[in-house]
Every structure is written in structure tokens, then in C-alpha cells.
Amino acid sequence: MTMKIAVCGKGGVGKSTVCAYLIQALLNRDRRVLAIDADPSPHLARLLGLDDSHITPIAEMKDLLNERSGRDGPFYNLNPKVDDLPERFMKKRNGLSLMVLGAIEQGGAGCACAENAVLRNLLNRLLLSGGEDIVLDMEAGVEHLGRGTIAGVDHILVVVQPYRGSIETAEKIDRLARDLKIRSLHIVANNCQDEEDARFIKEMCGQKPVGIFRASIETKKAERQGLPVTVASPEMLENAEKIISVLERS
Ligand SMILES: Nc1ncnc2c1ncn2[C@@H]1O[C@H](COP(=O)(O)OP(=O)(O)O)[C@@H](O)[C@H]1O
Ligand SMILES: [Mg+2]
């Protein structure tokens, strides 16, 4: 069974980092993985050690999006053609494919609805295609891609750190997931310094995190040097492997 995982949470909590380790954990099981970077300032490629110099986020392909959206004045196509896009925009290495969505700029008074419809359609199609595991690195909030998109995933992982703000964001995401009837939502505690941090998260969230990542100097260093983080901390990788095992059983 393939699994589709969306990784959400407040900005800077470590979503992309956790994604990178989860992706590596899946690849280590010889699974095929489609990683989708839906963060408005994407950098998942670098964390995975993929050369990002030739990756253009689809959102920046203005002409293409415009053409596909079939925009005509205030009207646009709600079901634009997107099925040829994945092949054109995916970066591949062994069992891994990466697609970078990027963000649609909300230029001036103009509405980006038409372009967003193309992106959303693309994402929905990818989530419906069943051949590989999907790890979706979400933007900080969850709203710009719309509720419909997130409804297509099997598991939501909400990354939190031991501070109140990140846990408030998690509560919002939890409510959204309940609205959408997504049954599998787990908390991932990140950047915990000690037992007290882990306990704070557990108490504030009212549930035991599915994984607890400690503050990792190796990961921090790798990121600073622009190196792949996935090889930096065997402990974080092992944690990610345990999370995958839990998701497989849930
Ligand atoms: N467990 C950790 N230990 C040390 N540094 C971390 C850890 N998790 C994330 N970081 C660092 O925190 C910063 C933000 O992480 P990132 O994954 O980019 O967050 P997000 O994708 O949520 O914005 C990065 O510099 C990353 O290297
Ligand atoms: Mg990120």
C-alpha cells in the first residue's frame, strides 16, 4: 500500500527537515517516493541533496499557467489540462521524484485564482495517482492550496516545537483535518532539548507525539553548509523510520 503524507505546521518548525528524513526513510525501504514541495519558498531539493539549479517552481511559469488556465477576462477553466506537467517538471533520482510547486504571487489587485486552479488541479491529480508514496511539504498555513487538496492525503503530520505558538497552529490544522474527516493526524515533536520539552508538547497537544526529534547539531550544520540533511543525523533518520512504521500500521 502506498501512503500519502502531508507535513504541516507553523513556519520554521522543521517541516522540510522532517520531510527530508521521512523521504529518506521511505527510500531506504526501496519504496518509490514522490516529494512535492509546496512551500512558497521551496528548498526541499537542497535538503535532499538534489541539484536545485535547474528546478523552476511551476508557480513561476506564468505563461504556462496562464495558457492552461484558459483565462478569458474574469473567466477561467476550473479543470485545466495538467497531465503532461508532472513529467516536464519532475526532478528524478533513483526511486525519488521531486516536484516543486512554489507560490503564486498575489500581484497587486489581480486575483491569482486562475493560476491557483492549475496548481490545485495538478496537485489533486498527483494525489490521485497511486503508484508511489507521496510526501507533501506544505506551506506554513494550509489554506492557499485549498481544503480539497489536503483531503486527498492519508496522513497528516503536524510538526510542532516546544513553544505555544506552534502548538496553536497545530490545533487549527487539527480542526481542519476533523472537518475533512481525515482520520490519521499525528503530532511530530521537533527540536526538543530535553524531557521537559517533550512533556510540554505532549501535555499541550493532549496526545503523545508519533515521533520526537531532538535538537540536532549535525542537522543544523548540514543545513548551514547547504549539504543534504538526510545523511547528517542517523538518529533523526531512525526516528523517521519509526514514524513510517507507525503510519503503516494506522
Ligand atoms: N531537529 C532539529 N535540530 C536542529 N535544527 C533543526 C531541526 N529541525 C529543523 N532545524 C533547523 O531549523 C530551520 C528551519 O527548518 P525547516 O525544516 O526549514 O522549517 P520549515 O520547513 O518548517 O520552515 C532550519 O535551519 C533547520 O536546519
Ligand atoms: Mg519548509
Image (spheres, rainbow, N blue to C red):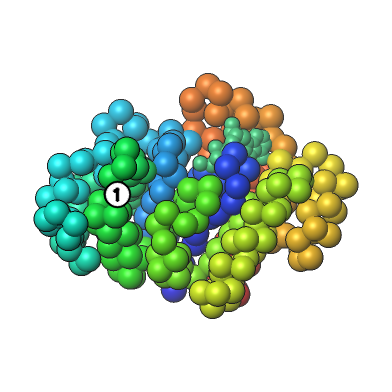
Residue 112 on image: x %, y %: 29, 49
Extreme right residue here?
196
Q: Is residue 108 visible?
A: yes
Residue drawn at 55 percent across, 74 percent down: 179
Among the 4 quarters of the image, the one containing residue 41: top left
Relative placement, left or right, of 110 versus 160 is left
Location of mark 1 (residue) = 111
For ligand 1, give the image quadrant: top right
Residue 87 on image: x %, y %: 20, 52
Residue 135 on image: x %, y %: 45, 56
- Taking depth in this image into account, of 119 and 227 the one nearest to the observer is 119
Quadrant in which the C terminus appears: bottom right
Q: Is residue 35 visible?
A: no
Among the 4 quarters of the image, the one containing residue 144: bottom left
Residue 183 on image: x %, y %: 58, 76
- Taking depth in this image into account, of 202 and 53 the one nearest to the observer is 202
